[in-house]
């Protein structure tokens, strides 16, 4: 909780004692599911308890004759926009389900989790709970201030030592000392202004009720009249039920302007891999089949968009093969553009811990087809070649952020009868994807002072 939301001790000590600090969300309970599906695991078999085997047999038979439903009754819906080259989810229920159960997508107005509505309510004073994005920004600001303070103390110690050694004049060099004192004074003035602005309302001449969206001089559309600004402020400080109800009603009137944006890999995994998402065209409003969606994503993985000449090493195919591979192993896969890689692997999710591995996709042309002609071999070598300078640069970035670099080699199969196009029925999508192989190669930066025998 930042300084702007802390109760002021000089206003009402009794109120401060009764104010309950909001607890953090229980992320283990919110993100308990790895996928937006219902699973029915069997109980463990206990060797010294024969009755446990009877329970397992009973559950197997009951699920065989009465199969439980794993998918939601109504599939989630999304829209594909060819102009923005994105897949968007606007339903609030679907947004929370996809994010909380698997960390799919990102908010268009947020860094990761779609929290624009909560942050807007908090900005207007309707909510006191900090979002994960606000907690991260506050911690970064605290670390930044700590580093500034540490640098200032180190500079003062160096100057003091130089003065003791006689290398810096104490009194004679008055211009140097005056400039330094002036800079320190300006810094203190700016700090005082910043602290004072945190206790002031957001606008000049705005009292406390007005800052929280209340107009004491006019009648509210909800039916509560605040004629006396002092009385309104007193009611606000006391937390009257009428005012709290007004705040809750005004908070409900805020329209959520944020939607969830899915990557091509996430959208196809939810549609084809899990079968819980339906994607519609934003232009025609028709549902896009899995086969058409695969072709559409392959075309839009190029820039500019290609309408033909699709190949087995299309960028979308390579990225989806790797995405599906690590998602099937239980990892939470997120975009890694921030760290100059293709994907980041989280053990449980971004809200629990930082990513442990960074994935870089490299095509591998091991099939004899790719080396039959010199021209074809030259093209494939150029696509798969990476310089040592590139490897050292990427590896050093990952070592700096404490992530392990993993090179994911995708073995490209030869094109089919129609130059890499899959067959017309949906079953051949799985057959085409099975022809790809993924090999993982972990790379670790060797440093002499840390890797001594």
Image (tube, helix red, strand yellow):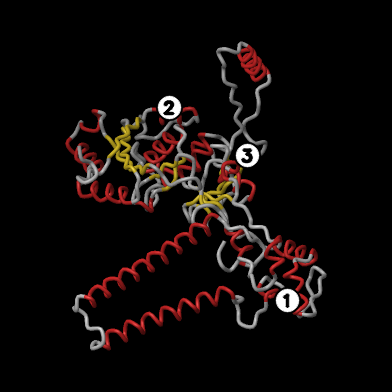
Give the left or right position of residue 287, taking residue 237 as reference: left
Q: At 62% from the left edge and 63% from the top edge, which residue is drawn?
A: 122
Give the left or right position of residue 244, taking residue 309 as reference: right
Across and down, in percent, residue 354 comes to: 43, 47
Mark 3 or mark 2, which has the lower sequence index? 3
Q: Nearer the viewer, mark 3 or mark 2?
A: 3
Across and down, in percent, residue 59 comes to: 65, 18
Q: At 81% from the left edge and 71% from the top edge, which residue is drawn?
A: 224
Across and down, in percent, residue 294 comes to: 46, 39
Where disc 3 sits, the SS reads loop
Q: At 24% from the left edge and 73% from the top edge, which residue is drawn?
A: 161
Name the one closer to the observer, 153 or 42: 153
The residue sitting at the front extreme is: 164
What numbered label is drawn on residue 431? 2
Q: CA distance from mark 3 to mark 2?
A: 25 Å
Mark 2 or mark 1, which has the lower sequence index? 1
Give the residue number, with chain letter if any, for mark 3.
Answer: 75
Mark 1 or mark 3, which has the lower sequence index? 3
């Amino acid at each position: 909780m930042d300084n702007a939301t802390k109760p002021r001790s000089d206003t009402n000590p009794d109120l401060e004692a009764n104010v309950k600090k909001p607890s953090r969300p229980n992320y283990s309970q919110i993100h308990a599911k790895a996928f937006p599906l219902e699973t029915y695991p069997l109980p463990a078999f206990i060797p010294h308890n024969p009755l446990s085997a009877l329970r397992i047999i009973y559950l197997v038979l009951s699920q065989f004759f009465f199969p439980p439903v794993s998918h939601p009754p109504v599939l989630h819906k999304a829209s594909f926009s060819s102009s923005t080259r994105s897949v968007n989810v606007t339903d609030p229920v679907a947004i929370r389900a996809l994010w909380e159960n698997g960390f799919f997508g990102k908010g268009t107005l947020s860094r990761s989790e779609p929290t624009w509505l909560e942050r807007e309510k908090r900005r207007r004073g309707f909510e006191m709970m900090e979002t994960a994005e606000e907690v991260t920004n506050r911690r970064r600001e605290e670390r930044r201030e700590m580093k500034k303070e540490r640098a200032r103390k180190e500079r003062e110690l160096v100057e003091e030592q130089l003065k003791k050694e006689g290398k810096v004049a104490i009194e004679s060099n008055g211009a140097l000392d005056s400039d330094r004192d002036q800079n320190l004074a300006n810094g203190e003035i700016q700090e005082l202004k910043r602290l004072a602005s945190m206790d002031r309302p957001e606008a000049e001449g705005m009292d406390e009720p007005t800052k929280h969206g209340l107009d004491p001089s006019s009648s509210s559309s909800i039916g509560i009249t605040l004629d006396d600004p002092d009385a309104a402020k007193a009611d606000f400080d006391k937390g009257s039920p009428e005012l709290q109800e007004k705040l809750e009603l005004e908070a409900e009137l805020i329209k959520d302007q944020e939607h969830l944006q899915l990557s091509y890999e996430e959208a196809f995994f939810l549609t084809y891999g899990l079968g819980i998402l339906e994607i519609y065209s934003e232009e025609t409003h028709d549902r896009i089949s899995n086969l058409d969606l695969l072709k559409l994503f392959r075309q839009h993985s190029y820039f500019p968009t290609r309408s033909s000449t699709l190949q087995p090493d299309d960028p979308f195919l390579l990225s989806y093969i790797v995405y599906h591979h690590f998602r099937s192993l239980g990892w939470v896969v997120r975009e890694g553009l921030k760290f100059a890689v293709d994907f980041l692997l989280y053990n449980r999710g971004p809200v629990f811990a930082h990513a442990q591995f960074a994935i870089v996709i490299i095509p591998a042309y091991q099939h004899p087809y790719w080396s039959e002609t010199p021209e074809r071999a030259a093209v494939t070598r150029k696509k798969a070649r990476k310089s040592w300078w590139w490897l050292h640069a990427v590896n050093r970035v990952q070592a700096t952020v404490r992530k392990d670099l993993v090179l994911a080699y995708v073995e490209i199969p030869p094109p089919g009868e129609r130059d890499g196009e899959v067959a017309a029925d949906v079953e051949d999508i799985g057959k085409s994807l099975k022809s790809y192989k993924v090999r993982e190669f972990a790379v670790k930066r060797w440093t002499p002072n840390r890797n001594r025998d």
